[in-house]
Image (spheres, rainbow, N blue to C red):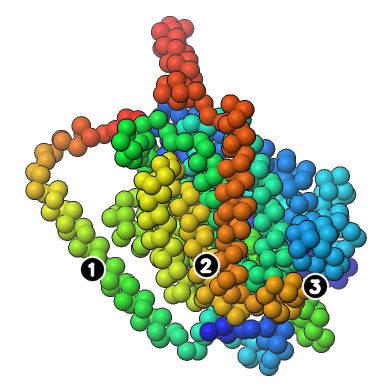
Amino acid sequence: MTDQLGALTTIFTEFYYWVTVVLMFLIHVGFCMYEVGASRYKHHQHTLMKNTMLIPLVTVTWFLFGWWIYWAFPTGPGIAPSIMNESTALITDESTFSAKWYLANTEYMAVNLGDHISGVFWAAFLLFSWTAASIVSGAIIERITTFAFGILAIAIGSVFWTIDAAWGWHFDGWMLKILGYHDAYASGVIHAIAGGFALGVLMVLGPRIGKFSSSGEPRNIGPRNPWLVTIGLFLIYTGFWGFYAACNIPIFDLGPEYGMEGISYWTATNIYVTPTTLSGITFNFLMSLSGGLLAGYWIAKGDPFWTYSSGLAGVICASAGNDLYHPIQSMIIGMIGVVIAYKLHYWVERKFKIDDAVGAVAVHGYAGFVGLVICGFVLNGYPSSGYSVGAMWDGTTYASINPLGMFLGAIIMFGVLGMLPGYVIAKILHGMGKLRIPREVEIAGLDYEMMETAKSDEKTVSSATR
Amino acid sequence: MATVTNWIDHLNKPAEEVAGAIYPGAGSSETLLVILAFIIWIGWHVLTAKSESEELERLARKKHGANDHKSNIAEW
């Protein structure tokens, strides 16, 4: 950095992402509180440990290969050429944003005075990875082994979500070019994929003991601690706000970026490097949150668990297009997503005997899927990128946003990269006898021995005289 | 309904146009959206008030005592 404007822009951007990472940490705090609140007393500590240990597991693997995948896979490989090197191969050449610079053993993956951005950008994406894994965590509480969850967390957090991000959440992603995919705040690339992955795992894992009667009627296993659920979801809302900021580039001159001679246009942009404003997305975040809360309160008849979850589902549903929607459009889209997700949750539960303990498949998967489909209609005709505009299926230019492309994108996110891998990996773990805890342990409670030891310790201490 | 169909063309416009609204239906749909929001807002009050009244009436008919709720505290 040798000039003042360059230095200011760089240091501001570095600090901006750093702050978003700290804010997003609250998402994980919220998920931990929420899951413990939703689990029964006898499973509390194992539930907490399971979700906590995804932090180091996903972080280390994200450092080793997750971040590399994001930069290597935008072309597919083999589906659409990169705008950087015009090749459809993995991007591992000498180009500026090549995965070559993000191998774990390069000098950019460390303190480097020539690179102020890689670390904070890496961390922002890492927090998205934690979120993807944590979404899955809630659905499968009280009966999965920590070992199996660790493998599944790495699969969704450091492999499958980063592939989908390379394909549909990267300025060079093939889904933008061929389908006109647009997903500014991750309805699909985080939420639909994680919800789909959770559904795939649940299909193999099966329900908690007692969830369904002998005639197949579902029983309600409500949250053990509504206060933890409440605070947890409020923290998730707060962290989600940080997530919205982290999905933007805070300051960028688009004139030179788009190759426009003599034109300078400074703005915030979304992940696709197209203009938006932090001000605009703040309107939309709050209006979609409100739409979700209003619809959730109404459809769940004031049930707090679903009302809070619906606030989140409202934001998730509107997120795909919240960089461009009008706030009232955002609110209405949030409401539609909540009604569909709520109805689908109970229909799937009854029809297929799926026990999603926290409604994660509905709130993240169905709401995310619906959000992508709606976005295709409401933003029909907008460019998916600023670099060029072309026809669908062409691949050398960027298709405009359209309903068919967004529908196909939703299927790729939820089904191809979410549900299918979740199902296959769970099947393998099940085949190894490593997926589910023994029936006797599930009935007694995962924390039984911890609680017994605590009782014994307490007895010893309370009977002591000195 | 798209307000922008090509970002390069859009940014090449005069500065005052570039700085304008970019949401779908800008300049033509705002009033309709506001009317819709009013209908939703009022409709929500009507629907939830009706639902709440039904629930309260049902609860009142059961005539529970002041301490009855204590037997309903679940210990999972």
Horizontal side, residue A451 vs residue A135: left or right: left
Relative vertical location of residue A198 with respect to residue A370 in this rendering, above or below: above
Q: Secondary structure at mark 2?
A: helix
Instruction: Indicate the position of residue A101 as horizontal and vertical percent values.
Output: 85, 54
Please give the name of the residue rendered at 21% of the width and 59% of the height, measured from the top-left corner: B51
Amino acid type, label 1: Val
What residue is shown at x 73% (from left), y 41% (from top)?
Answer: A61
Residue at which label 2 appears: A373
Front of the two marks 1 and 3 = 1
Whether residue A15 is visible to the viewer of this picture, yes or no, is no
What subunit carries mark 2?
A
Q: Which mark is residue A173?
A: none
Mark 1 neighbour density, 10 Å: few (under 14) some (14–19) many (20 or more): few
Q: Chain of mark 3?
A: A
Which residue matches tag 3? A5
N-terminal label among 2 and 3: 3
* Residue neighbourhood size for the residue with mark 2, other residues' Cα within 10 Å, grouped as few (<14), some (14–19), many (≥20): many
Residue A99 in which image quadrant: bottom right
Circles 2 and 1 on the same chain: no
Residues at marks 2 and 3, CA–CA distance in whole angstroms: 41 Å
Percent from the top left, x then y, of residue A364?
50, 54
Q: Nearer the viewer, mark 2 or mark 1?
A: 2
Asked if labels 1 and 3 share a chain, the reply is: no
Horizontally, is B36 left or right of A2 in the view?
A: left
Determine the CA span between mark 1 and mark 3. 55 Å
